[in-house]
Image (cartoon, rainbow, N blue to C red):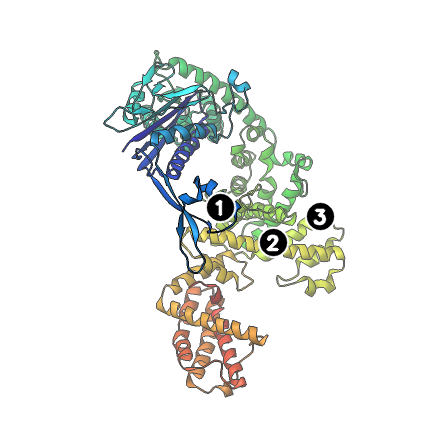
Amino acid sequence: MPDLLLELFSEEIPARMQAKAAEDLRRMVTDKLVAEGLVYEGAKAFATPRRLALTVHGIPARQADLKEERKGPRVGGADAAIQGFLKATGLSSIEEATIQRDPKKGDFYVALIEKPGRATLDVLAEMLPVIIRTFPWPKSMRWGKRSERPGALNWVRPLHAITATFGLETEEPDIVSFAVEGIAAGQTTYGHRFMAPSAISVRRFEDYEAKLLDAKVVLDPDRRKDTIVTDAKQLAFAQGYELVEDPVLLDEVSGLVEWPVVLMGSFDPDYLKVPGEVIRATIRNNQKCFVVRDPKTGGLAPKFILTANIEATDGGKTIIAGNERVIRARLSDAKFFYETDLKTKLEDRLPKFAQIVFHEKLGTQAARIARIEKLAAEIARLVGADATKTARAAKLAKADLLTEVVGEFPEVQGLMGKYYALAQGEDAFVAAACEEHYKPQGPGDRVPTDKVAVAVALADKLDTLVGFWAIDEKPTGSKDPYALRRAALGVIRLVIENGQQLALFRLLRNHTLWLLSQSWEDGDLLEELFDLPSSATVESARSGLGTQVAENGLKTALNVAFDLLSFFADRLKVQLREQGARHDLVDAVFALGGQDDLLMVVRRVEALGKFLETDDGKNLLAGTKRASNILAIEEKKDKRKFDGAPDAALYRLDEEKALAKAIGEVAAEAGAAVAKEDFAAAMTVMAKLRPAVDAFFDKVKVNDDDVAIRENRLKLLNKIRSATRAVADFSKIEG
């Protein structure tokens, strides 16, 4: 079957747009082909700085003929309905329709519509101009005199040529006949702007790709990346160095060149006094160059690798010299910034934060730092971190935001805090926390392990979450402008990957109170609220609150804490689902209430998941859900709960007695295992219930005619439910 070759040749497409543009072109063309009934075998799109290209192979030469029966109005129906039917179907008169008999609903008209399929070449000529005109560039422009006309073409950069051919491999392809803004589709393209600028005539994808390669254009972005990485590694190795790989930079650089030529430049070794990360950021951001490492020292070497887009006649000497001049100037600036920053201690920068607003509803950066410091001190006590070091780290962690280097290179914030802290003689753990308190910033980011860093990182993220929850700035749908989902995931990873138990509810409640209390006058009252137990409600605490302000504050704090716990549960479900765990098990654990220790939640989920994979687990789940379902029905019918202990004197059958005995034994043993946080052992104990539960449902009629016996048996079912709730609410488990 025939293949399509499409190329849109233009001025330079920004590197960051190329990959998505290629995918958009493939998607738009193939979706339209399928919509037109032209199912293809395969498609692949490509991008270079000056072109988008697409090949679609195995397209039928024409559409299939269409035959369709369309039901019309009843025979003898209103004239308006008949006329509408004729117009919709293209029939000239109602006599051209057939009559379909229906004894029940009456006879009605049916139109048989036959539409012959069109040649694919004609379909392409119709659809491709529309795709080009509606292409979803993030930014586009108009150009030339044509731009003055209404409806002028918008494209990312001036479009110069369109190649569009369609045909079999063994035949000369046809040109898809269309034009966009005076640019007619043809079979002419162009090679490298400088090394092979002449026009090239192409027929189909195979000779198109080969001729471009001869014309110094590597069409495939992956091939350009491989060339850059391979040549860069070889060049570095030849000099005794190692390439510092950078996948993000590689993506960008491959989008800047059509014919990659790798070269090596150098800079003054004196600049190596500047932290390596700053050197890398300088060279990367300003010149899109890679740095190299000296394997003997592990530090950076005074070399860099650049990617040119031309084979220069002088071997690249002029290109290298030009890049060296720019990099020398930029490194000089970086060295000046770094040395200037070292003259001012981190704590001396803190007063400036009082004039910097973090958020109009949350106050200044200084206020936020004070909150983080207080929260970090509390968390330090809970996780076993050194209180003095934690407080010092929390106080200094944000100070590098006001340095010259971070102002120039925001991506090194935190890291520069570490360097400056070490330079002024701070404890190594304090310095590490200054760097790591932002981590983890994504699912693949490293998690801090030192307790000081963990405490400050948790405080930073929890303060962010509490603050924005308190002012009702929560994520909605896909919108999360303050990266609150990422912050919650960071908290989860910090807790779980460090095996750290942390009761969140009291922390969240009290930090919310601390945030709200900034406008209160009664400091003693705040301490009283802090001392309230985690189970305290507004109602239970009202007698001691004293003021309406405090009462409203506690109400808000409780709402924030509960809502945030629910948010953590949702994030945890996402995290565990990605690891293969079932989300319903998370719901089953959180349904118990009071589950604010994320590590324990995860351990319960793990134990529950393993238990439910066994036959005992599956059968006990079925029995427990049966008990819960019966209880739910009867509780709704009687409008009451069947709490309380069953009366042993009312047991009529051995199966009742055996179940009661098993529940008592299991409840005691499982409770003891849970108290020791041994959830696997608790599940093993739970399995002992299975025979008794199975026998009970096999022999015992729950809804006995005797009211007292019925109530007693329902209380026994409630005991089953209560016993299994030592680990999870089985009613929330699917299956």
Q: CA distance from mark 1 to mark 2?
A: 69 Å
Label 1 or label 3, whichever lies nearer to me, is 1
For marks 1 and 2 on the same chain, the one whose residue lies earlier in the sequence: 1
Q: Secondary structure at mark 2?
A: helix
Give coordinates of residue 449: x percent, y percent. Answer: 47, 47
The image shows residue 223, relative to residue 563, as above or below, that is above
Give coordinates of residue 366: x percent, y percent. Answer: 66, 40
Q: Please tell me the numbered disc located at residue 508.
A: 2
Label 1 or label 2, whichever lies nearer to me, is 1
The image shows residue 175, relative to residue 93, as above or below, that is above
Residue 373 visible to an observer of this rendering: no
Q: Amino acid at mark 2?
A: Leu
- Residue most toward the left? 170
Q: Identify which residue, 341 or 511, lies in the foreground.
A: 511
Q: Please tell me the numbered disc located at residue 82.
A: 1
Q: CA distance from mark 2 to mark 3?
A: 16 Å
Q: Secondary structure at mark 1?
A: helix
For marks 1 and 3 on the same chain, the one whose residue lies earlier in the sequence: 1
Q: CA distance from mark 1 to mark 3?
A: 75 Å
Label 3, on which residue?
Answer: 518
